[in-house]
Image: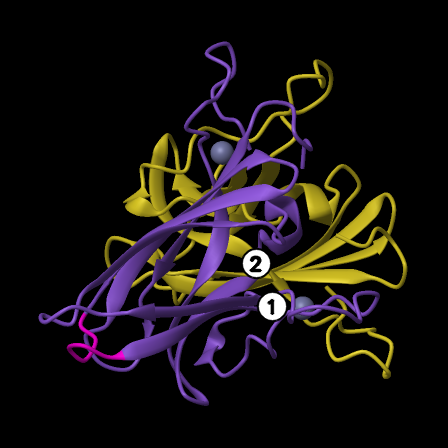
Chain colours: A yellow, B purple
Amino acid sequence: VRGYAGSSAGVAIVDTGKGNIQGVVRFVQVAPSSCIIDGTIDGLEPSAEYKLTVNECGDISQGCESVGGVYQPLQDGEGRPYGDLGVFKTGNEGRATFKKEDNVLNLPEIIGRSLVVNSGEKRLVCGIIARSSGLFQNPKTICAC
Amino acid sequence: VRGYAGSSAGVAIVDTGKGNIQGVVRFVQVAPSSCIIDGTIDGLEPSAEYKLTVNECGDISQGCESVGGVYQPLQDGEGRPYGDLGVFKTGNEGRATFKKEDNVLNLPEIIGRSLVVNSGEKRLVCGIIARSSGLFQNPKTICAC
Ligand SMILES: [Zn+2]
Ligand SMILES: [Zn+2]
């Protein structure tokens, strides 16, 4: 974890779970209080709403049931739950694409945890948030993470 | 990443790759210079030798080819490559079980990267190193990671 020397990037392949739901979500921390979240998820119901959360652990040994609850550092008692990334909507074909800026997330803090797609209280699909090569990496380094 | 307040634990499910090779490897950082690595891997050749490495990224979007090289922080010019965890041997049935102490690894530094099982120069199977609930976690916290 190298702080903000350059930007850091992460990726979650969300394909652990039931059915044909799968997607890729990328994270780029462009400034200390700005994390860009960019994703495409397929196989969902058309014109429906889902909630995206960062959950505590990345242990998918029992699928999405072993990743713990929505991540909330103990010291943060105010504001939204840290790991609550809000809702997104699908189009006619059951695909969702979204790109948003999050001012709460700090990428190094969520690396190794999991990203979960929820329908109401049900966890549909999840994936580990991994380090990826930075989009804006220093050309002299192989990998920005 | 909470340093050494209690121990931290990680898990890699190595099942991305060709064939029927799969396994689970757990990491517990029990002291600043002691990380216990405990794993079982199945589906390998009987009585053969494999190399275990931590690779730079955890981006498995192109399987084990997109995880970068063996992890080696730029500032560390001496000693073994940081991510080189050495070799392990399988038994008659193509299963390997190992438990060892590593005095170089620092778990927070490898979370979100990948664990790769190599045969010679070939990457056979890999998985993201994720945060898991701590084995020795404080009973007041849900998760030690
Ligand atoms: Zn990387
Ligand atoms: Zn945990």
Q: Quadrant of residue B118?
A: bottom left
Q: Quadrant of residue A102?
A: top right
Q: Main secondary structure of the magenta part?
A: loop
Q: Compared to A66, does B86 lie above or below?
A: below
Q: Chain of mark 1?
A: B
Looking at the image, the residue that sits furthest to the left is B93
- Find disc 2 in the rendering and name its residue: A130
Can residue A95 be seen in the rendering of this structure? no
| Range of residues picked out in magenta | B43-48
- Find disc 1 in the rendering and name its residue: B57
Q: Which mark is residue A123?
A: none
Looking at the image, the residue that sits furthest to the top is B140
Percent x, y for residue A39? Answer: 58, 62
* Left or right: residue B88 compared with residue A138: left
Q: Amino acid at mark 2?
A: Ala
- The answer to which of B70 and B46 lies nearer the viewer is B46
- The answer to which of A28 and B101 lies nearer the viewer is B101
How far apart, in angstroms, are the residues tagged by discs 2 and 1? 7 Å
| Label 1 CB less than 8 angstroms from ligand 1 | yes
Can residue B69 be seen in the rendering of this structure? yes
Residue at 82% from the left image edge and 74% from the top image edge: A137
Q: Is residue B44 magenta?
A: yes
